[in-house]
Image: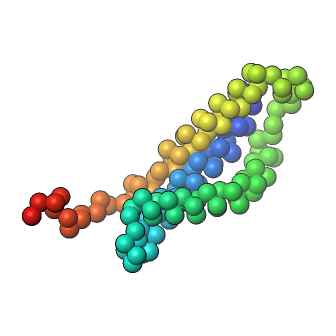
Amino acid sequence: MKLGLVAAVPCFTFGFLDNAIMLVCGEAIEGSLGVKFGLSAMACAAMGNVVADTTGQVSGGTVDTMLRPVLPAPRLSEAQRASRAASLTHAVGGAVGIFVGCVFGSFPLLFYEERQDDDDGGVA
């Protein structure tokens, strides 16, 4: 159980920050560069994702360092660490952490208002 938690917490943090940064940056890019250069919403989202992933990569070590004293890794023997159960627990813990982090990291969507396009759906 502790092994899964140790895997989940840093992944939760990554998922939360990654999604939140991507949404905020993608929206900012869409409202500035997207308008100026006629970029699609998807292109702006991709650029926001580049910023978020880069930030996550750079800050990942910091998060791990901060969490280590609070959530130390469980003491496992070499055989326990190499076991299929430990590997599966670590993988599932990480996946659940990222999933939940991404869901909570979607909170910026609560602050965005739906835009009304001037397009009438192609009707002349």
* Quarter where residue 34 is shown: bottom left
Q: Quadrant of the C terminus?
A: bottom left
Task: Residue 92 in the image: state x and y as whole percent.
Answer: 64, 30
Farthest left residue in view? 124
Above or below residue 49? Residue 103 is above
Task: Residue 102 in the image: state x and y as whole percent.
Answer: 53, 46
Residue at (29% x, 59% y) in the render = 114
* Quarter where residue 50 is shown: bottom right
Above or below residue 82? Residue 7 is below
Residue at (51% x, 62% y) in the render = 48
Residue at (46% x, 69% y) in the render = 29
Q: Can residue 24 be seen in this view?
A: no
In the picture, measured across the screen, residue 75 lies left or right of residue 7, that is right
Task: Residue 118 in the image: state x and y as whole percent.
Answer: 20, 68
* Quarter where residue 3 is shown: top right
Nearest the camera: 16 or 41?
41
Residue at (68% x, 45% y) in the render = 10
Tally of marks: 0
